[in-house]
Amino acid sequence: MGSGTTPPWWFAAPAMLLFAFVVLIPSARGVYYAFTDWDGLSPDFSWVGFGNFTDMVNDPTARQAIWHTLLIAVAITIIQNGFGLLLALGVNTVIKSRNVLRVFLFAPAVVTPIVTAYLWRNLLGPDGAVNSLLGAVGLDSWQQDWLGDPQLALWSIVGVIVWQFGGYSMVIFLAGLQSVPKEIYEAAAIDGTGPVRRFWFVVRPLLAPAFTINLMLSIIGGIKLFDQVYALTGGGPGHATDTISTLIYKEAFTLGEFGYSIALAVVLTIIVAVASTSQYFVLARNERAAS
Amino acid sequence: MNRYSKRTFALEMAMIAAALVVAFPVYVLINLAIRPTTDTSSPIRPTTRPTLENFTQAWQEGGLGGALMNSLIVTTVSVLIVLAVSSLAAYPIARATAKWSRGFFLLIMLGLILPFQLAALPLYQTMRDLGLLGSVWGLILFYSGLQVPFTTFLYVGFMRALPRDFEDAALIDGARPLEAFRHVVFPMLKPITVTALVLNAISVWNDFFTPLLYLSGSDQQTVPVALAGFVGQFVSDWNLIFAALVISIVPILAVYFALQRSIINGFAGGLKG
């Protein structure tokens, strides 16, 4: 077939123009503004070099927010995918409720995150349902101020996200599990291989693509996290749960520090880029090794 | 291994227990939403005097009707635009071997990585200058561009695995490229279009950060922003807030349970694409 059958390049023009207008050009301008003292309104601003970034290094709130962001991303990635995998293995059996469970356990993942976050803000309150339930089963000593205690609040946020998106990880793992041919699995079972070894040597390698997608989704979702923090704690108590994204919002819209806020966004971009490209290469290598 | 044994039964019970943990917050949500404000007993005790009063009040005072309408318009229009422009863009990107094709694809990949937070503030300024702040049209324009990289990426991956024979035959028969795309290529893309539709619709409907920035202070609200405003206004009147939350999730869950097979497959579909 000659070049006469190649679709013309201008088919891509509408999409690329929209994409350039909304993402590429503003992102490029963002990188530029990160080196200025722009206040978001006035056309006059001056170049401050790496000023915003050195401010960040000297700002304990920013350093903490970066740390919280990484901690949340790693915690969500491990816990959410751990539960998701267990649920998928449980649903991918002959239990009678498997179809109902699959639909039911996934349901929270389609609900608006800000809605589940407001729901949990009440449940995790001092007089909320979680403490009531603990009291009702005689575990009064376990009752906590889940969102008001600076030591706990970050973990409560992680818990809410795992509650909402565990079923999402499950569905991806389940799609991977269902691509494992039954014959392979049954052959291993007949050979007398135990369930744990069967999982490790037969199922796990075939799940590599599902791992890639799940780990990417949860780590990048965790790094960008905003809605749940905004609704659950607003970054508090104090700054105990501020993430890079909540700080970007506060610096720009409550403090008017647009330049500094965009510098934080540049740091966020670098973290996302490093995390996703390195993860992509590591997992792609594992996937090749597994296949 | 396909027998239903005692161990299977134990597993079944464990899984149902997990489902109950997931269901517990939903139980409390409904329980408090249908409880009169005067009832201050424990949130886990079933309501003795259920009422729909909270729902009426939340509906009247929360502007939820208008917000649901705005969310519906924004989601429908922007998802249709994104699907149209992205599938069209994916066609030459997947097929052409020229340098520009590879360049476009790399830009798309870059777009997958760039977090929206970087573009948000400069774009805020542009939207303001164009008078698009506080308008659903600004938001539609925004999502139409934001969702392009991800959607195009899905389409390109899917299209590369498709045979070229049908479109080549159509082109040889004298069809113009746009006709070949509309009548031959696009129908073959149906599985990935369903996936892209589901994923885009849910992420646009649920988005909070963008409308918080671009609609704040205006009377145009989408559901998530209207809810945030509602919570701010009725701070600790949780019965009322919960009623508003229930109202906001009923449409999503209704669609979800009605189309659960396509939706779950849509989410899992990125895996095969």
Image: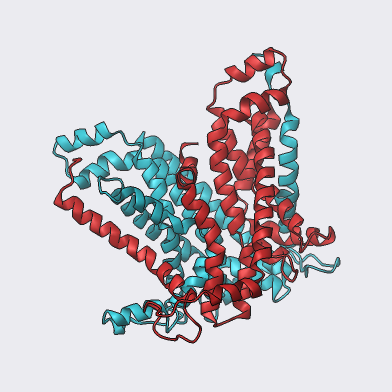
Taking the spot 48% from the left edge, 49% from the top edge, the residue there is B258
Q: Position of residue A58 (x, y in %)?
A: 61, 74
Using residue B49 as the reference point, say whether residue B149 is left or right of it: right
Colour treatment of the image = by chain
Q: Is residue A158 visible?
A: yes
Q: What color does chain B have in the rendering?
A: red
Q: Position of residue B82 (x, y in %)?
A: 67, 43
Q: Is residue B109 visible?
A: no
Image quadrant assignment for residue B80: top right
Q: What color does chain A have in the rendering?
A: cyan
Using residue A178 as the reference point, say whether residue A46 is left or right of it: right
Taking the spot 63% from the left edge, 39% from the top edge, the residue there is B106
Q: Position of residue A40 (x, y in %)?
A: 78, 67
Taking the spot 38% from the left edge, 46% from the top edge, the residue there is A173
Q: Position of residue A197 (x, y in %)?
A: 21, 44
Which quarter of the rendered picture does the N terminus of chain B lie within?
top left
- Considering depth in this image, is B261 or B38 the residue closer to the camera? B38
- Considering depth in this image, is A59 or B21 the residue closer to the camera? B21
Image quadrant assignment for residue A140: bottom left
Using residue A270 as the reference point, say whether residue B77 is left or right of it: right
Q: Is residue A89 above or below residue B251?
A: above
Q: Is residue B193 above or below residue B227?
A: above
